[in-house]
Image (cartoon, grey):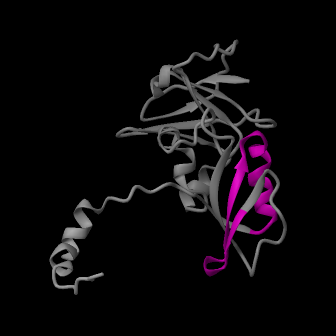
Amino acid sequence: MLTVLGVGLTSQVHAAAEHIPARHAGDQQVTLVTGDRITLSGGDPAQAALSRGPGRDGITFRTLRTKDHFYVIPSDVSDQVAAGRLDRRLFDVTGLIKAGYDDRSTGTLPVLVTSEGAALRSTVPGAAVSRRLPIVNGVSMKVDKARAATFLTGAASAGVKKIWLDGQREVSLDRSVPQLGAPARAEHLPRRTH
């Protein structure tokens, strides 16, 4: 079922469109960690449409625009987002596109998961472990977008405490290196001679 999102500062989405618009070359699509898909017609958040994931009829969606970020938060996870158990960036459609996590670029969504107790009690449906992170009692996982609708339910039963987007960071040394005085200190280091 496709819903055309009302875009404003915040809005609730209830009405369904009668047809699914054809995707065009400039359209951008993102599958959320809930399995819901958001399509931005021509890449424009003001022209957003929603396709609910399997078994998600009756879920409403709140949209939020802040600066150049467009969030779509499903009603069934809004409390978890507000409590910090689900990273808000998992629902930042423009941020996911910018990071290269749109559907055209990748079939998975990278997440970091922490659990209660020593380790996850079981595997989590819809995701594969990429790396164990024992120092934070967690794992790095890749959520299969085609099976994302099963991920959150499985995560809860596996003892997952918190889920973050395993986001990419851009390192900028042009400010931090001079602030540390690295160029001046490097002048005082012994020089190698070969």
Q: Residue 93: where, in percent of width, then height? A: 52, 38
The one of 187 and 46 positioned closer to us in this rendering = 187
Q: Quadrant of the C terminus?
A: bottom left
Instruction: Give the residue at x 63% y 53%.
Output: 110
Q: Percent x, y for residue 4?
A: 59, 22
Q: How many marks?
A: 0
Q: Quadrant of the N terminus?
A: top right
Q: Position of residue 6 (x, y in %)?
A: 52, 25
Task: Tell me the magenta residue range.
Answer: 130-159
Q: Residue furthest front?
A: 194
Q: Is residue 133 left or right of residue 169?
A: right
The residue shown at (66%, 79%) is: 134
* For residue 164, above or below residue 25: below
In the foreground, 75 or 137:
137
Q: Is 145 contained in the magenta span?
A: yes
**For residue 166, which quarter of the picture?**
bottom right
> Is residue 1 on the magenta stretch?
no
In the rendered view, would you say 181 is above or below 170? below
User: In this rendering, would 171 be left or right of 35?
Assistant: left
Q: Is residue 80 left or right of residue 121?
A: left
Relative image position of residue 174 (x, y in whole percent): 24, 60
Q: For the point 20% across and 71% down, which residue is it?
A: 179
- Residue 94, relative to residue 137: is it above or below? above
